[in-house]
Image: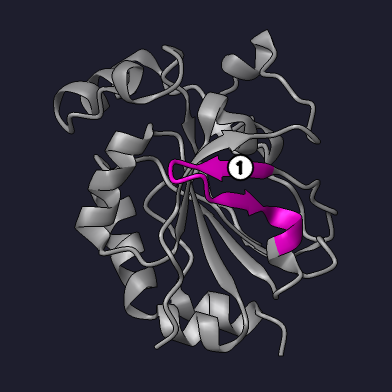
Amino acid sequence: MKTTKIMIIVLSISSMGLSCKAQDKLKTVNNAKGLEVGHVVENFTAIGVNNNSFSLEKTLEKGPVVLIFIRGQWCPVCNRHMNTIQDSLKYIQEKGAQVVVISPEKPEYIEKTIEKSKAEFIILYDEGQKISDYFDVTFNPDGKTKTIYNTVLGAKLKESHTDDSERLPIPATFIIGSDKKIIWRQFDPDYKNRSTVKDILDHLPK
């Protein structure tokens, strides 16, 4: 089984040149639309805690990328999804693709995601939620929802994220081809609905 080295990434996006505007911070889950199939994705780069570097552009030279957004280690649905992806990782890799997971949580919290899922794929720390903003999957949960996440599920959003906005990504999946175009996406405001391994395998290039 081919194993991808785990990298906890501190995000550094230079080419996107995007900042979170005030209206973006107020975006509801139904306002986020996600990048569409056919969109050409701009490159982003990142540096890992062990000085490992990640570049979407360079990674795509090796084959397609399965880009998955998660809410955090506190989310039981995310953890089950990551476990499922890990269990079938070899089938995705056999098709020449790499799995790259995007989390809004700081590296110490991503460690918990790795522990819970035994992840052998790349996990990126989306500092400032620049990646999720670019992919238009970030939204601002209402106050009641934030309270439930923080108290019942122990999310500690202000502590675990870059800022205190407590915004979250819709847990979408995008398959990006070597030409940087989005081949397929699973995008659903309902956090319980996730991409399946069959979906991913069926839509990866032959």
Q: Is residue 162 magenta?
A: no
Q: Could you tell me which quadrant the C terminus lies in? A: bottom right
Compared with residue 79, is residue 4 higher up or lower down, i.e. above or below?
below
Q: Could you tell me which quadrant the N terminus lies in? A: bottom left
Residue positioned 44% across, 60% down in the render: 194
Compared with residue 193, is residue 88 higher up or lower down, i.e. above or below?
below
| Rendered location of residue 43, percent (x, y) | 77, 47
Magenta residues (range):
45-58
- Residue designated by label 1: 46
Quick one: 143 or 133, which is closer to the camera?
133
Q: Residue 153: which quarter of the image? A: top left
Compared with residue 104, is residue 54 higher up or lower down, i.e. above or below?
below
Amino acid at dot 1: Ala
Quick one: 116 or 189, which is closer to the camera?
116
Residue positioned 46% across, 71% down in the render: 4
Residue 29 is at least partly visible in this image: no
Q: Residues within 10 Å of mark 1 (few under 14, many from 20)?
A: many
Residue 5 is at least partly visible in this image: yes
Horizontal side of 110 relative to 42 (left or right) equals: left
Horizontal side of 7 relative to 29 (left or right) equals: left
Q: Residue 74: which quarter of the image? A: top left
| Rendered location of residue 94, percent (x, y) | 54, 89
Quick one: 72 or 110, which is closer to the camera?
110
